[in-house]
Image (cartoon, rainbow, N blue to C red):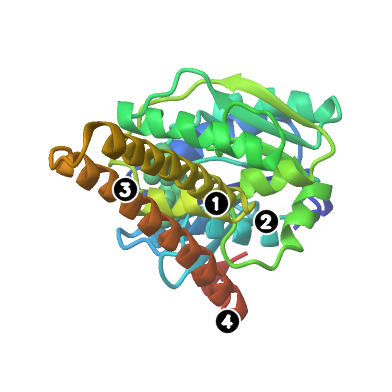
Amino acid sequence: MSVAEDHPELSIVIPLYNESANIDALHERLLAVLAKLGRPFEIIYIDDGSSDGTADILRRIHNNADSIRAVIFNRNYGQHAAVAAGFEQARGEIVVTLDGDLQNPPEEIPKLLEKIDEGYEVVGGWRKERNDSPPRLFFSRFANRIAARIVGVETNDYGCMLRAYRRSVVDRIRACAEGSIFIPALANSFAASVAEVPIAHAPRRFGRSRYTPLALLRLNFDLMTGFSLMPIQLVSVTGILVAVFGLAFALFLLLRRLIVGPEVEGVFTLFAILFFFVGVQILALGLIGEYVGRIYMEVRRRPRYVIKEMLN
Ligand code: UDP
Ligand code: MG
């Protein structure tokens, strides 16, 4: 191994979960881009517990080159755990992450590096024209607004994983011990300067999103509750508003009773209002449960992931 490969300037980190159909094309395009850049690099693939032979493909790719490394998990731990494992392994001064399904074109990497060279600590890709399903886009927009609020850094796309980080930020993220992490938000909260560049976004080439609706919900909970107490505080505010509203309503009913006299109609309206209150209460309970559950998970101190095999 040459000196350059011992200390590559650039580490590319790619999480893979059942992406066997995409790896070869991705690898080829990535190598072409990196060759043109002419900076010493390493590519770190993380197999996040795939069951489709992704690890075998990685072994084959690895055999052909020194600068290709791989981490193979013993089961599925999620994209962000996989990227965290990549950060742990990365030796480069600059770390670039991207998806393994070719939705993030490797050809956009130079754009990110340009901004890094300008001095930014974190550069995020912004999928201005996203190729995902409409409901996904709707919820993402919503989650983004909240994330920007919570993290306090106004960027348009917290979900995009085509990003570049300087070593300083990578080290700060590595120092975080919490079990569930959301890397772009963590990075933005640590970085002194964050830039965002519009990038292309392709439809998924093979297979469908590896996120089930439940996994996506969990990821968003990681983002929301992992970064602030705002959600639970919002519930408290809702509670106060509902109580005020309830009191006003009671006064109104009392006045009505005095003016109109006893009446039976409106019973169902009351039911509707009651159901609303009950709903808010259950939501509040669930949210408290979410925080308590998270405290429990953190207290247990289980490892974020377990590595089965390393290809170095
Ligand atoms: N991924 C992963 N572990 C998971 C889910 C996804 O490593 O549990 C990887 C996946 O293989 C891909 C990237 O994360 O390289 C983004 O996933 P996907 O394309 O399914 O997400 P989407 O584009 O729908 O956000
Ligand atoms: Mg994708």
Crowding near the residue tagged with mark 1, few <14, some 14–19, many ≥20 C-alpha atoms within 10 Å: few
Count of residue discs: 4
Crowding near the residue tagged with mark 3, few <14, some 14–19, many ≥20 C-alpha atoms within 10 Å: few
Which of the labelled discs sits on residue 87, or is there none?
Answer: 2
Amino acid under disc 1: Ser
Q: Are marks 4 and 3 in contact (CB under 8 Å)?
A: no
The residues bearing labels 2 and 1 have C-alpha atoms spaced at a distance of 38 Å
Q: Position of residue 189 (x, y in %)?
A: 74, 44
The residues bearing labels 2 and 4 have C-alpha atoms spaced at a distance of 23 Å
Examine the rendered structure and indicate whether residue 110 appears above or below residue 19: above
Quadrant of image for the C terminus: bottom right
Determine which residue is flagged by label 1. Answer: 236
The residues bearing labels 4 and 3 have C-alpha atoms spaced at a distance of 26 Å
Earlier in the chain: of badge 2 and badge 4, it is 2
Mark nearest the camera among 2 and 3 is 3
Apparent side of residue 88 relative to residue 215 in the rendered image (left or right): right
Which of the labelled discs sits on residue 213, or is there none?
Answer: 3
- Confirm whether residue 212 shows in the render: no
Which of the labelled discs sits on residue 286, or is there none?
Answer: none
Location of residue 39 by image quarter: top right
**CB at disc 1 and ligand 1 closer than 8 Å:** no
Earlier in the chain: of badge 1 and badge 3, it is 3
Amino acid under disc 4: Arg
